[in-house]
Amino acid sequence: MAVSNRVICTIIVLTIMNLLNNMDRVTISGILPDIKKAFNLNNGQAGIIQTVFIISYLTFSPVFGFLGDRYNRNLIMFIGMIMWSSVTLASSFVASGKQHFWLFLVLRGCSGIGEASYGIIAPTIIADLFTGRQRSTALAVYFLAVPIGSASGFLVGTFVAKAAKTWRAALWVSPGVGILVAIICILFNENPPRGKAETNPNVTDSWRGFQATSWIADVTAILKTLGYACQFFTLGALAFWSAPTLYYLQLTLTGHATLFQIGLYFGVILCVGGIGGVITGAGAASYLKKNVMKEGDAIVCAIGMAASGISLYFCLVFGAFSIVVAWIFVFTGSFAIFLLSTPVTDMLL
């Protein structure tokens, strides 16, 4: 099936949105030790930053899913992108001191709301533009932005913070790009009717002719959603705590560590391992579905999740004795967790 220039533009814009989405999440992690100093926080209090973000993201995800099924999805993403860009920039100007930490938390919560708007809706647009192998390919391109964006968050964030000699500068990079992408989205993005790619000709507007699913199929769909939630939780926790943990680990083992150094190492490992994982996972799932079994997506997801858990465990146990061993298992864990990206979304869509 030929793909129009407007559809290609849509995929590019959605992918950039996903890249910025993940840049924002990980940038905070790369400068977390500096944020702790600015607001005089311990590790437990610093963890609240990610907790507030995730709670707001998860709370508003169903809301945007509901709205996306009924209203203009490009408009919803535009509003969300503008909101995210504004509050991200505003959070960089919150005054230091524990008494101002609450405002930083409020802005991070609003950032989660903004990200939920396009993070939830973007994959549904891809699903409505493509079917079959083309959909898997488009989703693979879209999810390549996760490791690239995460790596960029570490690399760009720590580099800019070091160059400007303030952690606040790390939050000045992505908002400008976000506003530009939001404008392109509302002006040029394709907005296909919901379910366009797989419309059943026997189904009328009143849903006559629609074949109801079995209880087993419904339970399976719920379990798939819970599986995706587990992957999202794992990625969120690792993205937030991995860099600070490795920073303090290297400081303990070698007596020397800088945020820029950790950001560089972690960014490169995450980028290489993540890209390899996304491409391998999409290719393996596609091959299994075509040549071996229709449950290929689920098999790849199960292997990836199990392997990432094992790698994380080994990193925590053996990394305490060698920073090199820790970095090796960070790489294998990144590769494994990103095996899921395309297959799990393909199953849900």
Image (spheres, grey):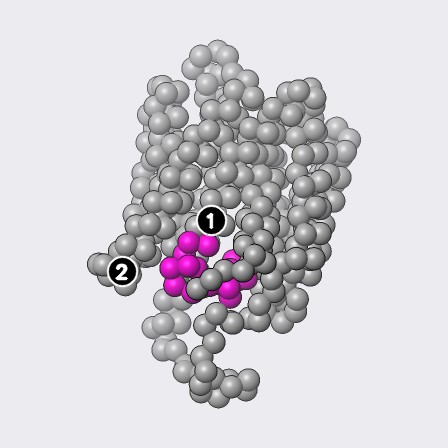
- Residue at image position (36%, 66%) is 220
Magenta region, residue range: 122-139
Classify 167 as above or below 189.
Answer: above
Q: Where, by quadrant of the figure, is residue 209 drawn? A: bottom left
Q: Where, by quadrant of the figure, is residue 154 drawn? A: top right
The quadrant of the rendering that contains the C terminus is bottom left
- Residue at image position (47%, 49%) is 141
The quadrant of the rendering that contains the N terminus is bottom left
Query: Residue 123, which numbered label?
Result: none
Which residue in the structure is indicated by mark 2?
Answer: 290
Q: Residues within 10 Å of mark 1 (few under 14, many from 20)?
A: many
- Residue at image position (77%, 31%) is 95
The secondary element bearing badge 2 is classed as helix
Give how far across and how far down residue 39 sits, in percent. 69, 29
* Principal secondary structure, stretch drawn in magenta: helix
Say whether residue 44 is visible: no
Which residue in the structure is indicated by mark 1?
Answer: 141
Q: Is residue 223 magenta?
A: no
Q: Between 123 and 220, which is closer to the camera in this rendering?
A: 123
